[in-house]
Image: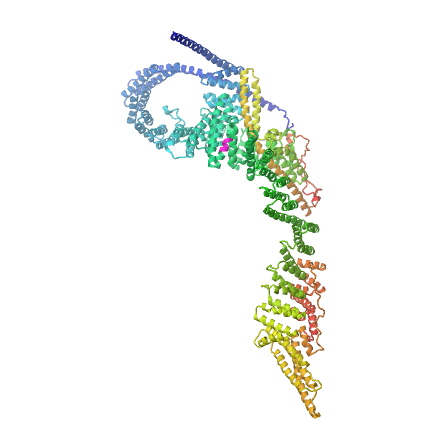
Amino acid sequence: MGRIFQMKSVNYFQLCFIVFILVATAVYADKTAKTYTSDFSGETQKEKAFLKKLRQDETKIDLAIRNTKALIDKSRNKSYLPELYLRLADLYVEKSRVTYFIRKSLKKTPLSKLEALPANALKNQAIEIYQRILDHFPSFDQADKVHFFMAHEFREMGKIKEMVRHYRQIIQTYPESSYVPETYLLLGDHYFKSQNLDMAQTHYTKIIEYPHSPAYAISQYKLGWCYINRADFSSAIKRFETALRSSKNKQSTDIDTYRHVDIRLESLVDMAYCYVDCYKEHSPQTAIAYFQSYAWSLTSYMASLEKLAKRYFIKKKWAHSAAIYRKLSDLCDDSDKLLRYAQKIFECVRATHIYDQIAFDVQMIVKALEKQRYATHMTSDDKLEKEKEYEVFAREMITLQHETARKNKNLAALKKASEAYIAYLNFFYLSPVFWDMKNNCAEALFASKQYMQAGKYYETLYHDSPGEKTTKKDILFSAITSYYHALKNKDHLNAYEKNYCRQGLLATGKLYVTQYPDTEHVEDVRFNMAWITFDEGHYDSAINKFKTFISEYPNGRASRAAVHLILDAYYMKEDFKALVNFGNDIISNPEITNTKLKEEVSGIVASAEQKIVSSLSLSAIDDWEKGRAQMFNMAQKHSRTALGEKALIALLGTALEKNDLKTFFSAGKTLIQKYPQSRQHENHLNLFIQTSMTIGAYQLLVQYLEIFCKTFPDHSDTIMFMEQAAAIYQVLGNHNKANRLYQQLLSDRKQKANIKDILFQWVKNLIENHQLSDALKVLENSELLQSKKDKIVARAKIACLNYQLNQKDRAQKIYQQLSPLLSTQNDSDIQDALLEMIFYHTMKAYSAYLSNQMSDKLDPELFKQKQAQLVQLQKVYTQFLKYPSPRWVLAGCAHLYSIYTDFANFLRHSPAPDLNDSERKQYQALIDKKAKAYEQNAAQFKQTFHERSQKWSMCDPKLIAWMKIIDPKKTPQGPFYKKTQQVDDIITLMPPNELYNLYEKRAASPKGLTPLMSLAGAYMERKEWGQAFLLCADGLRIDQISDFHKSALLTIQGKACLFQQKDRMAQSLFKKALDARPENKNARSAHEALLTHYGYQVTSP
Amino acid sequence: MNKIIVLLLALLMFQSCSFSTFKSSTSNNQERTHQKDLFKQGYKLFSAQQFQEALPLFYNYLENQSPDADNYEWAQFFYGICLKKKNLHYAAFDIFARLIDQSPNAKIVTHAIDLFEHAINQGQIHESFIRDTSLCTKNFGFIESPLSHFIDFHQGLCNWEKGYIDWGNIQFSKIPESSPYYLKYQFELARLNIQQNQIDKAIRILSEILKSTHITQSLRSRCHRTLARLYFEKKEYAQADTLYKTIAKYQKDQSRFLLERAWTQFHLNHPNQAMGLLVALNAPDFNQQITPEYFLLKSLIYKKLCNYHKALSIVDDWNAAYQDVVNGIRHRHSFNGQADIISLLFHKKLIKNTIKIIQQLSQEQKQASHMVNETVAHALTTVYDLFIQRYAHKLNKYAEKAYVDIANQLLSFEENMRLMHYEIGLSMYQRVKQSRSGMEKHPSIETTFEQPVIYPFIGEYWNDELDHLRVSLTDKCQTPEEWDVFFK
């Protein structure tokens, strides 16, 4: 085992093998050396040997002639005699040939006629013998052969007439002879040579009948030439095509004359000759394709194309010729040929002024010259001369092409020019105009958008060309511009190119700034240098460069871009804090006057701030305590800034997500108080409104609703929010606040507000609060009311209030107008209102009636007056009984009871007139009877009152006054719950601490009844009846609530109403609760307690 | 009088001219005779295999004769042979090439082509040299087999290269199966199929070639590596590996194939064996053979086995090895001054071959300069100068192009290594995430083999070890490491 990286020890077999190889190589070397010398020496020796052989042949032929002659002599009258003669003739022909070659070998040059005489004499001898055969043996079966040979010999001797005669003889006499096709061919050749084209064509055409003859392909070829001579190129090319196809597999032919002719190649090449005239309209590409289809090798293809190119050139079809020469150049590797082709191309191009293939042409020239430059068989002078010659030639072509491309602004042509320049410059680096050409090249590269290459060339020009500093300034700037443009479209660049352009721009930019600091482009250059650093991803460096740039050109053309790129850089680095700081610096920079830019920056800064906060939010998801603290800190640190606001907003979102309501409302309070001008203020308020509503914090909800309404008085939601807030305040028992909102809604004449409800609720609140004058004022605005009905009701109420305020005249006036309506209006609301008005209208009469009591002395006038009053009151109160209003029925009953009772008492207690006893007795009996009648009436109304009130069981504090008339001792003193509600007016914007837990549970499960019930319970404990009521109302809106829960919620609501002295509503709710679930003991006991309180009998279920 | 004097002068002038013409004609004849003698003498020496002595005679003859002189082409040929005998191959074949181009004599052309064939087979000249002749564009119908197969092969290739596939096929069809060029043609056919994306067809052809009994070692090697690469591309790694295993034992360019085989092993999920092959590349004999790809694969292996620290350190190694080169590229330095990048350029086949030619040319030039005959020595030195310039020019062109490719690759590679660094970090993080979700501390898994042969690297290898070479690598994917806690 040997080491792999060391030479292994060579074993025996390997050694043997190496020895064998060495020996074999040596043998090969020796063998070849000998072969070479023998081959060389063989050339002269062969000539000698050939001559020797000829002489030997001559001797042998002589012997054969002698023997044949002898045999002929002996064979007279024999049947084979003609064959012997034929043999003899052949021997003479053979001897003639040998004699000729002997003489030629000795002389080594072609023979003169005189020198060829012996050979011809022998031929004549042969001809004589052939003739003898024909004369003496007319039936000889090889006569066609004899004629054919004779014709051949006559041709060699130049006796054409005889030749023709014998060939004709074959055709005429021996039409079936195998010599016929060849005979036609040779005759055709004869006529062709003698310019007798018709005859030639006739003879060649005859051969078509012999397609298997070797003469066939040749005849087609020759026919082609006949057509060429007639200028019928179309027919000619077809003949050549046929010749080519039929000779495809026949490399050589048996026909003597054509033995060394490659008919296939000849046909192909001559097709090129015809093609130019035959297919004048064909493009060069079609021509190329045509010859490619007929060629069978690269050699044949190139041969045909050479001919074709030449023909086109001769015919001055320059473009075609140039195209074919280009194709040849592409195929060829021979430097001499390449240069020759280049020369031809140049001539064509110069004639046409079409330089569209300039790049290829110059590349071909360079390819050829490069081969020559390193060729060992040429002298340096020759090489230099050629290079010089072609340098001028190439230069002229390129510059002409560049000029045309520049004029036409043709991008593709400019690209070709640049390619040509590059080929030129790579080779002709010693050219006297090298730098000019390089400059042109750079221009062409730039113009054809090959920016990186252009940059390279300009850079080299700057560093190496011999030029003035002023000229070089432009060159250097061109380099910078080139690199800049290259990088503008960097998607087309690979990693290397990108780097090259970046570094190129930096290097050239640095030079430019140093060398030409005062020029106009310096600003752009400096910007681009910074941009490159940015583009490269070196953001810190780019930021510094751009900052310097901005400080120097605060209002420069590119400053806006610089600012944006710095912002982008910070963005890429995800350094949003720095971005915000930089952005704020820009915004506050007085030197920068571009307000639009500052607006843009402001937007970006805002977005960045959002990013900062978002990142904090994200981190808060993992670690809420830490994240919350961070966000609070940020909010505090950046208090009253956009960032601070965003931090709070983020905190809100995250807190909500985390269900941390304390943080939510805490951040919210800060946000609302510190950022009232925020663009997001509306959204924030909406969020708090929504959240408060969701969790059931109605006290908080109204606060936010109020803030919203104050902040956005003209918002489309404001009226709705105000109405909602008022309604909530109403429920919460905070009538003052509700009234204030009502006032606001009405005073501002909010068109969309529900005026009727607001107005009447407000009035109701004021009346309940004993603010009768205020109520009156409110109702005086009744013109706001839309419907006639509401107006009647309002006016009735005004009348009531006026009566209550003792403003009789005003009341009376209304009364006069409205009272007749009672009989005409069927609407219960109107009837109620009118009855109330009548009630108040009657109140004084009622009081007066009650106060009209007899003194000790009977006063008949008073009696009459009282009686009249009774009748009047009776009429009024009886009227009350006609209407289906329980309240006013009871009022009517109570007052009728009152007036009848009073009148009975009045009668009983009136002093009797001065009567005697019996009269007195009679009088007393009569009075008693009368009084009893009144008392019966009173009792009847009392009974009715009891019956009706028990039937209706209305737990309404408003009925207490009537109850007192009927039964003062059993009458409740007031509503069920005596204490009035304490209303908390402090604005906290925060829910109470102890309720957070419950709120969070409710927030986590807004449709869950357990958290709702828990919270409602908590509200009840906290005596926040209104909130409990509203919360339960919310719960009752839940779909598919069970009867159990419905009943429970209604019970809580009922209790809340009880505590708010809304006994009638409480009664209704308890009833509903019991309807939903009769087993609800809470509801039942509360309901029973309420009924008992009002003195109603409780019936068992 | 004056007229007489003028006439006399004119007569005198005519006489002198006539005399000088005569004299000149005489001396020319003598010179011609002398030149003929030079050839004869040269030829005599040549026949006696005294090539050294024949050389100046032929040289002088050729220098002073025009190409149409008797025996000129033979003199050229013999001169070429003499040069070849002196191992001045490029000078000799320059002459043979010219003789082929000029086609003066069928015998000479036949010999010249025959010499070319032999020299190429012996590695005396580079194969591309024959293409600088007109071999492809001429008809050599007079050359008989088996030499004609050599011509058919090259002409066939030329046609294919120029896009004339059918003509190429005609040319190749003339090569009988018994010819050594038939297998070469088959190999080229396989390559053509690869170019045409007919991979299966190419594989079939290459497999057939390998079945042949008279395949040369060089062709076998080329077939093996092409097949191996094709199997690799087709993701048939097991078959690729079998072939790479064979190649690695006899290839000069062993390092390249070790790396390719390491990739194959990696894809076969044999990280230990892949790493073994990579570690083998550190052997002194493979100095300068390590490429950026080596680092990439190594870090991939470590990453695969969760040896994250090592994987990261390989990225650092890459940086250490190529940072200077990359910096040079970044700062647009020319490759001339950068040794590291030049060593990378040497990996390019064209450049490697051109350098070899230049080295041979320099060696031959040195040899030529020591020739006894100063004139010949000087002439040959000039010829070699031109040759060297020619190949140096080519080398420069190749190098410039290759430099741009390499520079681009390195810059892209730098990016990839950065990505690798990132991905390793990501894998580390993901691993920690997995461990959080229940990955327990398992004992480290060490890949074992039925008969493991584990060689600790001590800087050298035994050839036979390569197939068994495995580096002991621990799969740490199930084993939390100390750094994991940082992510927790």
Q: How many marks?
A: 0
Above or below A1022: residue A401:
above
Q: Specify whether residue A307 is painted magenta.
A: no
Q: Main secondary structure of the magenta part?
A: helix
Locate residue A27 relative to residue A1001 in the image: left or right: left
Q: Is residue A35 visible?
A: no
Q: Position of residue A911 (x, y in %)?
A: 70, 87
Front-lying residue, A59 or A831: A831
Colour approach in the figure: rainbow
Above or below A192: residue A612:
below
Q: Quadrant of the N terminus of chain A?
A: top right
Above or below A294: residue B26:
above
Above or below A487: residue A673:
below
Q: Quadrant of residue B11?
A: top left
Q: Position of residue A56 (x, y in %)?
A: 39, 14
In the image as oriented, which residue stretches furthest toward the front?
A809
Q: Position of residue A716 (x, y in %)?
A: 59, 59
Q: Specify whether residue A418 is painted magenta.
A: yes
Tell me where the magenta segment starts and ends, as one range: A417-422
Q: Is residue B93 visible?
A: yes
Front-lying residue, A435 or B1: B1
Locate residue B301 relative to residue B6 in the image: left or right: right
Q: Quadrant of residue A486?
A: top right
Front-lying residue, A645 or A1062: A645
Q: Position of residue A355 (x, y in %)?
A: 45, 32
Q: Quadrant of residue A69?
A: top left
